Amino acid sequence: MTPRDLTPSSIAVSVGRPHEPGDPLSAPITLASALVPGGAADYARAGNPVWAPLEQVVGELEKGQALAFASGIAASSAVFSLVASGSRVVAPHHGYYGTAKQLTSRPDLDVKLVDVSDTGATIEAMSGAALVWLESPTNPALEVADLPTLIGAAHDAGALVAVDNTFNSPLRAQPLELGADIVTHSASKLLAGHSDVILGLTVTRDPDLYERLRAHRHDHGAIPGALESWLTTRGIRTLHVRLDRAEQNARELVERLRESTLVDEIRYPGFGTIVGIVLDDPHRAQRATEASSLVRYATSLGGVESTWERRRRHANEAPTIPAGLIRLSVGIEDVDDLWTDIEAALGA
């Protein structure tokens, strides 16, 4: 069977494994700064054998060609390098503040931050744009965009489209199949899945975009470490079972939270592992995140462990995000234990 005959869960487990007799079943970590000339690369900034399995499996999952980067921010930086000075870029105003900061810190760009759940307003902002950057759901507001409509409208306007697929993973959404030009991931999150890796990815089907992104990685030194690449590949092998369990937990917790009098608003798009809990009192929200024991108080998401934090505790978070919004990343623990911990912390 070829990878194209397999379901995504089987692709996650099988693609990128060695096949020659005597090879280890999992590609080994290659710690080298120089390689013997004559192969794909002769210096480790241009390539490392441990990158290949990772890029192969993510490329198959997203149905494109993947490139691994030092971090999610490094991956988005490579995408933004495609945009010429003076260009317009459209992006979510409630998206990840790290990428928003990358854009707004460039005075040479005309950056339009929009509510991507407002399809009409987003399309209106696309006039003359060179790049439309999308998240769906957004981080941390969990706003959902109409990706097929927005991607089509962006192309009609002559813009490239990049979609940050971190919250979904390729098991829940494949934006290239919807027409996007580039997909990015903070692989530190769901893909690696154990809160022990910093790594990013881009994926595209366009050979020219692929080469420009690869050149940016090489020329700017935004390369992933060998250990991080190996750990991310290993994490992807269990992505489907981790995601299914965490998403099941998230749905159950959302049902219980919506019946609770301890919260003022629940945000959940109906899928995924991230839940927004809004309390009217930001001080109470902060105390709740610090009072839990099983749910860890941390700036992280997508790991096997559940974590939460009040997002406005970060100075760079958008001021239009509710001050009492808690971003809960649901892990794979027993759901009753999670509920007991969350209910006690909110009551505290």
Image (cartoon, rainbow, N blue to C red):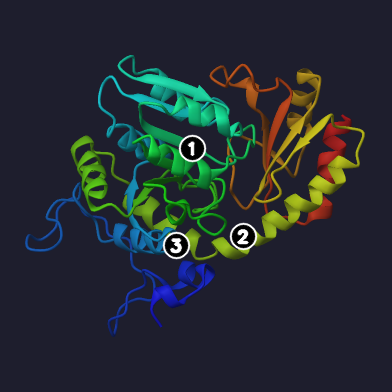
Residue at the top extreme of this rendering? 107
Q: Which residue is mark 2?
A: 242
Which of the two discs, 2 and 3, sits closer to the camera? 3
Q: Tell me the kind of residue under disc 1.
A: Leu
Q: What kind of element bears circle 3?
A: helix
Q: Decide: is 61 above or below 18.
A: above
Q: Residue at x 92, y 34 (%)?
A: 261
Q: Can you give x and y, in whole percent of width and height, for residue 84 in the image?
A: 25, 27
Q: Tell me the kind of residue under disc 2.
A: Arg
Q: What kind of element bears circle 2?
A: helix
* Rendered-image quadrant of the C terminus: top right
Task: Say whether residue 40 is left or right of residue 97.
Answer: left
Q: Which residue is mark 3?
A: 61
Q: Examine the rendering and report whether any part of residue 136 can be seen.
A: yes
Q: Can you give x and y, in whole percent of width and height, for residue 256 in the image?
A: 86, 46
Which of the two discs, 1 and 3, sits closer to the camera? 1
Q: Which residue is mark 1?
A: 134
The part of the image, by quadrant, that contains residue 152 is: top left
How packed mark 1 is, by other alpha carbons closer than 10 Å (few <14, some 14-19, many 20 or more), is many
Question: Mark 1 and mark 2 in contact (Cβ < 8 Å)?
Answer: no
The part of the image, by quadrant, that contains residue 221 is: top left
Between marks 2 and 1, how big is the CA–CA gap?
A: 25 Å
Residue at the left extreme of this rendering? 38
Q: Can you give x and y, in whole percent of width and height, for residue 83 in the image?
A: 29, 30
